[in-house]
Image: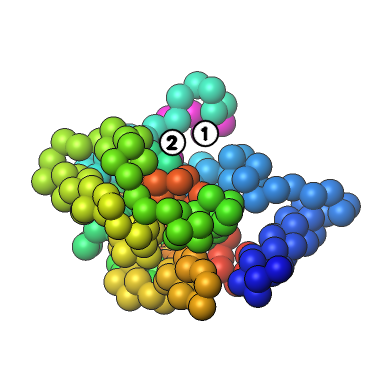
């Protein structure tokens, strides 16, 4: 078995241990299931309980987001109804300068002290299916691979710019996740690793869980674990 693949399996085992320990009793909860049940909130969100207690569901953050990254939970989400969330598969958060979502929040549920990308901790990314990563299997990006991504919101210049950049990968090797990460020092959040016989993306310590890599991966092999740090998931 190739060494990097072993590394991936080791990480999978670490996730299992982490989530088993997290929920106690040795019960294994997969990262995917965890991610489905814990909400990915906009940047700067207070701890979940405080967030739920203070957010007045005014929708200001949703209104000002230029990437249309934020949506509002409907009645199916019971105690979270009316609160803002991010579905990284539809649109990640592009870590805008000055964080308009935070500035617009009248209650501080999105904390006004959060002013730089370094202050953000929305969650952390992980590669959930390395065997289908285009870079890992040596598959070039084809036009059809981008169909879903190109159907995402495209209502203004910023959104068009993102989608145009992704289209430029057609016919090329896939390094979309690492190239499109909006964290200022991308490589400290995600990088492509080039080994003798294989290439793969590696999540690094500064990943803030913004979800852009998950949104733009043409093979949908990246997920976000909300509300967790790199250390909690990978250490
Ligand atoms: S930082 Fe920008 S892209 Fe991210 S949620 Fe706030 S307004 Fe939207
Ligand atoms: S690797 Fe980059 S794009 Fe992906 S979640 Fe982390 S910070 Fe965002
Ligand atoms: S964007 Fe997806 S398919 Fe492309 S290199 Fe990253 S993980 Fe692999």
Q: Is residue 133 left or right of residue 141?
A: right
Answer above or below: position of 165 versus 156.
below
Binning the other alpha carbons within 10 Å of mark 1 as few (below 14), some (14 to 19) or many (20 upward) gives some
Q: Dot 1: what SS?
A: helix
Picture quarter with ligand 2: bottom left
Query: Which of the 4 quarters of the picture holds residue 76?
Result: top right
Q: Is residue 40 magenta?
A: no
Check disc 2 and report the residue beneath it: 83
Q: Dot 2: what SS?
A: loop
Residue 145 visible? The answer is: yes
Check disc 1 and report the residue beneath it: 80
- Which part of the image, by quadrant, shows the N terminus? bottom right
Colour pattern of the rendering = rainbow
The answer to the question of whether label 2 and label 1 lie on touching residues, with beta carbons closer than 8 A, is yes
Nearer-the-camera pick, 129 or 67: 129
Q: Position of residue 169 (x, y in %)?
A: 27, 54
Residue at the limit of the structure toward the left, as seen here? 157
Q: Which mark, by number, is residue 33? A: none
Nearer-the-camera pick, 60 or 201: 201
Q: Is residue 127 left or right of residue 83?
A: right
What residue do we see at 87% from left, 54% from top? 26
Quick check: is the Cβ at mark 2 less than 8 Å away from ligand 1? no
The segment highlighted magenta reads: 79-87
What residue do we see at 52% from left, 33% from top? 80
Answer above or below: position of 175 versus 61.
below
What residue do we see at 74% from left, 62% from top? 13
Binning the other alpha carbons within 10 Å of mark 2 as few (below 14), some (14 to 19) or many (20 upward) gives many
Q: Is residue 98 left or right of residue 85?
A: left
Q: CA distance from mark 2 to mark 1?
A: 6 Å
Query: Which of the 4 quarters of the picture holds residue 54?
Result: top left
Residue 88 visible? The answer is: no
């Amino acid at each position: 078995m190739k060494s990097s693949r072993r590394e991936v399996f080791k990480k999978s085992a670490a996730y299992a241990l982490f989530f088993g320990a997290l929920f106690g009793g040795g019960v294994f909860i997969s990262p995917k299931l965890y991610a489905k049940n814990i909400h990915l909130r906009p940047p700067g969100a207070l701890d979940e309980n405080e967030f739920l207690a203070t957010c007045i569901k005014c929708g200001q953050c949703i209104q000002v987001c230029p990437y249309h990254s934020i949506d509002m939970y409907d009645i199916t989400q019971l105690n979270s109804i009316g609160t803002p969330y991010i579905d990284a598969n539809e649109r990640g958060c592009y870590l805008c300068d000055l964080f308009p979502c935070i500035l617009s929040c009248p209650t501080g549920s999105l904390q006004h002290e959060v002013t730089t990308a370094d202050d953000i901790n929305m969650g952390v990314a992980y590669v959930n299916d390395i065997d289908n990563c285009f870079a890992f299997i040596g598959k070039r990006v084809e036009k059809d691979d981008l169909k879903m991504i190109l159907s995402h919101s495209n209502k203004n210049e910023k959104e068009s710019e993102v989608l145009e950049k992704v289209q430029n990968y057609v016919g090329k090797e896939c390094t979309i996740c690492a190239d499109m990460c909006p964290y200022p020092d991308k490589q400290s959040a995600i990088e492509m690793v080039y080994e003798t016989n294989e290439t793969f993306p590696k999540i690094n310590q500064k990943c803030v869980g913004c979800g852009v890599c998950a949104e733009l991966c043409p093979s949908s092999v990246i997920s976000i674990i909300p509300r967790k740090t790199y250390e909690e998931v990978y250490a």
